[in-house]
Amino acid sequence: MPTRSHEFPNLYFSQSDVTVLRAQSGSTHAAIYSSLRDAAEEMKQRPHATILPRSWREFTGKWNEIYGNNLPPLAFYCVLNSTDRAALELAISTMEAFAGYQSWGVSHVPKDDVPVAHSIVGMATAYDFLYKFLNESQRVLIGAKIIEFATVLYERSLKAWWGNSYVQNHVATNYAALLTSALVVQSLTPNAKVWINRANMMLNRTMTILGRVTDGSLSEGVAYGSYTTRSLFQYLFLAMRHLGLQEDLLRKNRWLVKHFDFIYWTILPRFDETIGIADTNTHWFYGPEDQLVFLERFVMRDGRANWLARAIREQHRKGTIRPARAHRFVTLHLEYLFYDSSIPDKPPINPDWATTGLGKTPTDRDKHAGAYTERQSDKPMGTYLSYKCGVLHGKAINQIVRDKTVSWINGWRNFNPGHEHPDQGSFIFYPSGRPFITEALYGPKYTWLNNALMFAPAPPLVRTCRGPYAGQLGDCGKWFAYQASGYWEGRTGNLAAAVDGRTNRMFATGEYAARYDPELVLDKISRSLLLIRPDTLIVLDNIRLAEYSNVRAMSAFFHNRYNAFVLNAAERWAEVLVEGKPHRVHWACPGNSGCILDAQVQAESYKAEYGKRSTHYLNITSTVGSMSASIVYVFTGPSANVSA
């Protein structure tokens, strides 16, 4: 396996590249450099909050990724501006402090290797960037500490769950850290070659698996997906630079070719939030500017990704999109290094209505999509509709698990979709860009926290977490339950979708009875959506029971995390004011298919990734009689009227 020489810097660039890199800071890369400079200024002014903990006890007493995350951008800024002695002294002081710590983990989660990986990446990258500024004793001390914790991480990869897993944020983060550290210290320890080989094998396998996902999506969604791609794209760059990976192979990977679409079409119309697939907040955890400029330079080369990176960069600078403190600066050096300014920005050419399937599909012809989105061009007040209906981990990977067609895959044990949600049949609706039906975002895996259906009474053997009502397979825990073959066998019917470009009408339908416990004996659950105009959506739920089912009621949930619903039970509608404008939900039972038992509006708070979140929801419960039921819901914006 080829590797480059051991002189420093060498990881992402050589000393001979520094002159050009510095020149770019005042020309083609000035906007990115401005962000790097601002980041360095904030770190100098608030070192203990951003990069240099006061003590090892403080460092290990909380989730500590921020310190390792901020080291590389600060070190790279020092490369670009070597006259800033305060910044350089802060970077070196931080490295010396890290080298004196007995561990880099977090005390309350001692078996979690991710915090250690963040520190390894930070220290190894800064060591490479700033090697010439270190004295000999610092080089020995810091190099030895990187080797110490890289050794621990390698040994953990042979025992921990993530060590033999694929396509998950822990996997990508930890193996990218192992590779980064090994490339940096390969002249200091013979073990580095073993670490490089293992990290390269596991990350290359992840990319091979993703190559079957032809719509560019990730089952971990937008936020955790950016966590994974931050490390995967670092790996790809390092593999091209050091390990002989050919650039043309990237353009042959179908997931890479379509990943821009996943980033672009999961942005809501106002460009200030993204949709929630799996655990997420309201946008990306990492980047995505660095991922986008990487795709532009090595995969796309048509200007669209550079255009989107610039648009998101502007939102970050305006404060419209506010990343968490630990994520604000972490990818700035990568964005600078990956950006190819010779490719001019070019906005995507969109029709008035544009659609995309986000379905983890095994072939481009396959319509078994896991999610479907509809966005009205790029207008800030355009309508956005998203609908989810798919199998666990998406069809391509689910098929690998079930069919066992890959020799190094041992079923579901090689995957961890714990961030997924019990959200099949769920949808969001933003008429004219306003958040009418929303997601509840990161939280416990409860079916009722999604715009989904539950059924009662639950049989004795079915796990429940909302009284007598049973939700979808995998719910009721902090993490989605996937550790049984039965969860992976829940196949769904085709998610079919069509758009009439002349009338701007959209229709989507999916069938997902298999995502509920077989003990419920549900024969069919289908939800169909018909968007008849930008502010009017009709949703139809059809339920059919098998002969021996004891289900007698179904309960539907519709969320708005910003505003409360007001109920008019007598006239069967509920209203929520969105930005001061009334939006209504109407419901009815067509024919004699069933009758409404109850409609309620509620608000709930629940534990999320940091502190608590809250949501408001409308809960409509109906009987299931004569082995079937149909309920129709009409969602209208302020300019639409519904007559009885």
Image (spheres, rainbow, N blue to C red):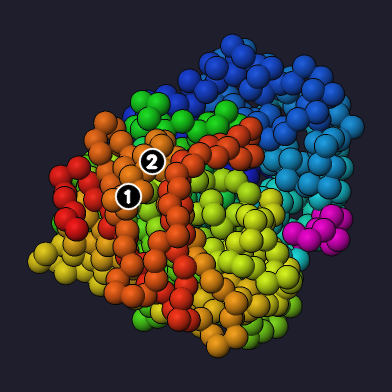
Q: Residue at x 83, y 37 (%)?
A: 108
**Exactly how many numbered labels are in the figure?**
2
Q: Is residue 207 above or below residue 362?
A: above
Residue 156 quadrant: bottom right
Furthest-right residue in view? 102
User: Which of disc 1 and disc 2 is earlier in sequence?
Assistant: 2
Q: Which mark is residue 565?
A: 2
Disc 2 packing (10 Å; few <14; some 14–19; many ≥20): many
Q: Nearer the viewer, mark 2 or mark 1?
A: 1
Q: Nearer the viewer, residue 377 or 392?
A: 392
Residue 155 relative to residue 299: left or right: right
Query: Can residue 110 be seen?
Result: yes
Check disc 1: other Cα within 10 Å, few if <14, some if 14-19, many if 20+: few
Q: Main secondary structure of the magenta part?
A: helix
Which residue in the structure is indicated by mark 1?
570
Residue 156 shown in magenta: yes
Spatial separation of the CA atoms under disc 2 and disc 1? 15 Å
Q: Is residue 183 visible?
A: no
Is 341 in front, or is 291?
291
User: In terms of secondary structure, where does tag 1 sit?
Assistant: loop
Q: Is residue 564 left or right of residue 417?
A: left
Q: Tell me which amino acid carries mark 1.
A: Ala
User: What residue range appears in magenta?
Assistant: 154-163
Relative to the observer, which residue lies in front, 306 or 512? 512
Q: Residue at x 45, y 26 (%)?
A: 35
